[in-house]
Amino acid sequence: MRFYSTTTLRRPGASGIGHSRNSISVKLMIFLIEYNRREGRLVTFKVFAELERSKAQNLRLEIELDLNRRKIDHEVVLLQAASEAALHRTHGRYFKDPRQILDSLIAQLDRSVKMLQQE
């Protein structure tokens, strides 16, 4: 069973005092990612509840110390998001291979060029 904490986000300009319609509650999760930059490959992916933040931080430190001892150059990060889908949207490079990233960048560039041509 996984427990998630709830964080209240306020809309811009909202004071948060007596204005419940100006805020939304979001259950946040913590994601630990170990990523091999050279190979463009996800090595470790673990999910923690907000209440497990210190556990996630300790594991991140443990992994980084181990990688450092073994002289392995991987990126190790803790990210917070409402869902794994949200994480994929905001940090997609961790979940795509180099070819998919390149294809995505080319598509974005094509869209930008078309928009400029229409002006």
Image: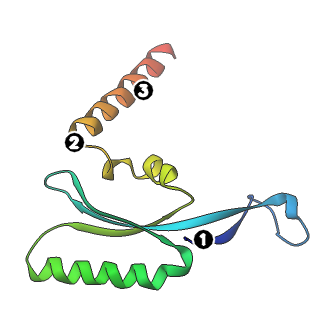
N-terminal label among 2 and 3: 2
**Residue matched to label 3:** 112
Towards the viewer: 67 or 11:
67
Q: In the structure shown, which secondary structural element does the residue marked by tag 1 occupy? A: loop
Q: Are marks 2 and 3 in contact (CB under 8 Å)?
A: no
Q: Amino acid at mark 2?
A: Pro
N-terminal label among 1 and 3: 1
Towards the viewer: 72 or 85:
85
Report the side of 54 relative to 11 (left or right): left
Seen in the picture, residue 30 relative to 106 is either above or below; the reply is below
Mark number, residue 98: 2
Q: Quadrant of the N terminus?
A: bottom right
Q: Residue at x 91, y 70 (%)?
A: 18
**Residue matched to label 1:** 4
The residues bearing labels 1 and 3 have C-alpha atoms spaced at a distance of 39 Å
Q: Amino acid at mark 3?
A: Ser
Seen in the picture, residue 61 relative to 48 is either above or below; the reply is below
Mark number, residue 66: none
Towards the viewer: 111 or 101:
101
Among all residues in the image, which is located at the extreme left? 71
Q: Are marks 1 and 3 in contact (CB under 8 Å)?
A: no
Closer to the observer: label 2 or label 1?
1
